Image (cartoon, coloured by chain):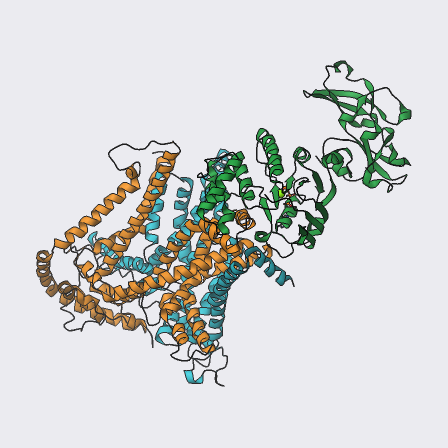
Chain colours: A cyan, B orange, C green
Amino acid sequence: MKKKMIFSEFFRNNGVIMGSALMGLVGFWLIFLVILPQLSMLDYSFRFNLPPADVGTAKDVYTLSNYEHLLYGSDKTHATFNTVDLMVFVRTIIAAIMVTLFNIVLCYPLAYFLGQSKGSGLARLLVVLLIIPYWINEILRAFALRIIFGDSGLLNETLMLLHLTKEPIDFIRQDIALYAGLGYAYILLMLFPMYNVIESLDRNQIEAARDMGASWTRIHRRIVIPHAKPGIVSGATMVFMLSAGALAAPQILGGPSSLWFTQLVYQWFNDSLNWQQGAAYAIVLLISTILIVLTVMRIFKVNMGDIGK
Amino acid sequence: MSTASIIRIALFAYLAIFFSYLLGPLVVMSLTAFNSAAFPSVSPWACYTYEWFDVLFNDKHIKEGIYYSVIIGLGTVALSVSMGLAASIVLTQVWAKFRSTYYTLIIAPILVPGVVLGISTLVFWDRFGDFIRAGDGSMLDGLFHNGIFLTILGQSSFIASYCMLVFVARLQRFDPGLTEAALDLGATHTQAFRKILLPFMRPAIASASVLAFLASFENYNTTTFTIVKYKTLTTVLAQKVRLGINPSISALAFIIIMMTIILALGFETYRRNNARKEAVRLGKAKESKGFLPGFLTGNPAAIVLVLVSFVVISMIGTAQSYSPQQCKAEVLAAKKAEVAKAIKALKLKRTIKQQSDSLKGPDIFTPDPANKKGSFGGVFDPNNLTNEEPAKPEAPAANKKPASGAFGGVFDPNNLQKD
Amino acid sequence: MSSGVAVDLENVWIKFGDFVAVREANVNINGGDFFSFLGPSGCGKTTILRAVSGFLEPSDGRVLIGGNNMAGIGPNKRPTALIFQNLALFPLMKIWENISFSMEVAGASAKERRKRADELLDMIALEGQGDKLPSELSGGQKQRVAIARALCANPDVLLLDEPLSALDLKLRQHMRTELREIQQRVGITFIYITHDQGEALTMSDNVAVMKAGVIDQIDNGHEIYDRPATPFVASFVGENNVFRGKISQISGSEAVISSNRSGELRAQITPSQVGKMNVGDDAMMFVRPEALALGESDPASKTTVSAKVLNEEFEGASFSVFLEGDGGKQIKMAMPNLGQKLEGHTGETLSVHYDANNAVVMPAGELASE
Ligand SMILES: Nc1ncnc2c1ncn2[C@@H]1O[C@H](COP(=O)(O)OP(=O)(O)OP(=O)(O)O)[C@@H](O)[C@H]1O
Ligand SMILES: [Mg+2]
């Protein structure tokens, strides 16, 4: 009854043609591109990887085996854990968190500087300089870092030239290249939300606080950071989600012995052709990252409306 | 020294570090495009060369990738801009109670990992095809397994959210009274949309289209799953980079960087020029009468733009006649002597490395035969590089260039893949 | 030009969720009338107008235009044109395109549109300004363009939502006359919304006074001013002295209240309450400052009050004299400036007197808060 009223009001406000076009587009997007695909992936993750002939037959039943595989590996007795994959998972999450924290620390001063010197020539130049790398392909950016961190890359050559090291340091195997690459890849998604909120902070507030004798650290702790909180959390959310879900950077910059969780998903799909297993891994990744983000948003009392500003 | 000057110095040091982290890699990568060394590097500078651009322009995989990237980009722009616009309009009308739920729904795709979006698109449309019983070979069946179609859908699922954000920002400044006024004057809803809202949204639609196209063009995570049999620029690049890197990729990056810079400067010039015209119109500034063309007046962006264009044009000009053959021959001779010396050392190193790796576990670190095609072979026949098949590992040691690297690319992804 | 068409609201209720914005409105507007809705901010005036123009469906009741039920007919199909509170000129269109927009959507050629736009520009005294953008016009000019744009659609009913509120005083007075002239020239029904009583009284044939979603009184300006139907109308329109008390005596259309502080006072019962009031009812009596005059104390007439002069204000054409009656009762009296002087009287107790025909009594109720 109430629904009917909402719809009739919607169509009266938009006309039948425009109303249907709007509804159709939004409906197609949300239902066919977002909700149903996620649900069907969820459904897939509970099924066996059957040959096409067996799909839909009595053998096609629901199972937890794909999730069990992440926990126990191929060990059917469940006596030992699948330490390899679990370690990859834990490492991915922890590393993504570290990358996020690194980005916060690195971006905050610049965001503050840009936000408070808005309109000045230097600030505008810096913003243009920031935007340029933003439009360079993720893969090319990873490639650029690979040139620098490679065995005979610029960094090693420089270090050896300065006699700081004799042997080239294997930055890639040490995962240094990977972390630098992940931090590099999404740094602007951290910077811009922070910059936007700090820019909206009234300078007078800072001056008033300084007038009352507050120290710089206190001004930041009590005034700037609380004001910038939505931007920081918004940026951190994006960086965390994108780092945890990154594929290109780990593929290009990752060491041979350390995988990223998305690479496992990729392997299940493209190498082992076991979509069901891959879907289960993807679901684990999706749900755990969302839970982490929601927890952080709850802790910092930031809501969804602040994301994407 | 006063605290103020310490703060200043610290600030500049910090800015320098930040921007070298951000821009340094791009500069280095651009430089490697002009070094004749087969492994992209700057430090042992061999010869200044344009040959990597030739390699790039003759690479049919890259060309094909660009072609499909553009098609997919255009499709994604069309779909995601219309979905994003519709979603933002609905957001202004949706019941206050549902607004936050609705907003969460339409913003969520931005936060879902691209890998997950790719997989779910692939899985869903595969099943949807089965569900509506599109038999093999039928048009629908072809569509649901068509990489281009799936990639457009997969990318649009989250790019539409970006577009939506652009539109919401603009819609906030729209007076819905204008649409009502149009309706009141007899316009149909469609006319009111076309004549009132659409013109108002035009700048936002333009920026959303650019944003959507670029986001689509550079997307990898989603595309790599949904593209199936086709390839886009990013998947081609990823494959090349994983199989072993060479400076033709740097050449591509250099072109993209230059285009970005010219576009950014062009945009800035356009904006300043408009601002100046407005000022002239309002009588706040005088029409320039100097010898400079009007659009250069007080417009540093325009001046830089002209300079950059000049550099690019002269580079293209010299590229036609410049030949590094002489320099290369010298470098080659020098290298040969060096190689002979290095072979021994290399052999020793490899044995040690292999031993230590085998202790570490399943992921075996082996020198990658694919990379050996680099260095010398590439110098003489650039087209070899575009060959996807790994060069045959004949005389591996002699063909390697230990000092300047081939080793950077030793991680053969095939070795990484388990089972 | 089309001639006026009647507009009727029958028992109209408009609700937003649980909130009632308009309660049981019954209004009959004659064709060709200049009809005003007057009321404080937020009382539901715009809401009523939106129901007439078709942007809102009443939750209950009917809207009739020219006798036809408008239920289910969208704003683009109704013979009304609305001038918005903020004008809503299309910022990206030139003036002439704005004016002729209704022809554009009907498919008229650019030549026809330009011709009609130029005619209307002449009418609103903006000839030759058709190629400007709205942002390049002054407030009053925009105002006139909005009127021309609405008239270009040849509406049977023109709806105006506080169109003058953004203008300065001088321009507002000028536009009032101009609007009234346009209305007389085109002869269509105008429904005008305002919270400015001066505007409503000078321009309208009839005025509806609203309070919080309820229409208190519909009448011509004189009746509204002289015979307010409720305490709200009495106190909202113009200034009034209010005396509270209980009815002590009724004879026909006249009643006497025994006021709380000022003794027995005689007044006319407001027409809508004649025969409905009883002795002992709580009542309010209103008398306008200009209906008060100095006079002899005459308690038997039941039309005098004694009060002490507090101070006076000179207002050019008149004086306002502020007095304090028994028990601190505030009374305001207006006297035409005839050269007399009251300076010496401050602090004196005087006798103030009025004509019972110029005072109204009605059941007690809520006053308009200033
Ligand atoms: N769309 C709506 N949803 C909910 N409440 C509304 C809506 N539109 C109006 N109202 C409420 O209805 C009441 C009447 O609003 P209306 O706009 O009619 O006032 P008004 O008399 O025109 O006031 P003003 O003189 O300030 O323009 C107000 O309390 C307002 O908050
Ligand atoms: Mg209003």
Q: Is residue A241 visible?
A: no
Locate residue B111: give its quadrant. Answer: bottom left
Please tell me which residue lies in front, B47 or B62: B62
Q: Compared with residue A218, is residue A12 higher up or lower down, i.e. above or below? A: below
Q: In which quadrant will I find the C terminus of chain B?
A: bottom left
Asked if residue C108 lies left or right of residue B347, the reply is: right
Residue at horizontal 11 percent and vertical 56 percent from the top: B324
Asked if residue B365 lies left or right of residue C122, the reply is: left
Q: Is residue C320 visible?
A: yes
Asked if residue C295 lies left or right of residue A42, the reply is: right
Locate residue B60: give its quadrant. Answer: bottom left
Q: Compared with residue C129, is residue A18 higher up or lower down, i.e. above or below? A: below
Ligand 2 quadrant in view: top right
Q: Compared with residue B270, is residue B285 higher up or lower down, i.e. above or below? A: above
Measured as percent of width and height from the top left, residue C193 is found at 64, 41
Q: In which quadrant will I find the N terminus of chain B?
A: top left
Please tell me which residue lies in front, B115 or B42: B115
Locate residue A75: give its quadrant. Answer: bottom left
Asked if residue C17 lies left or right of residue B245, the reply is: right
- What is the number of callouts on the image? 0
Measured as percent of width and height from the top left, residue C138 is found at 50, 34
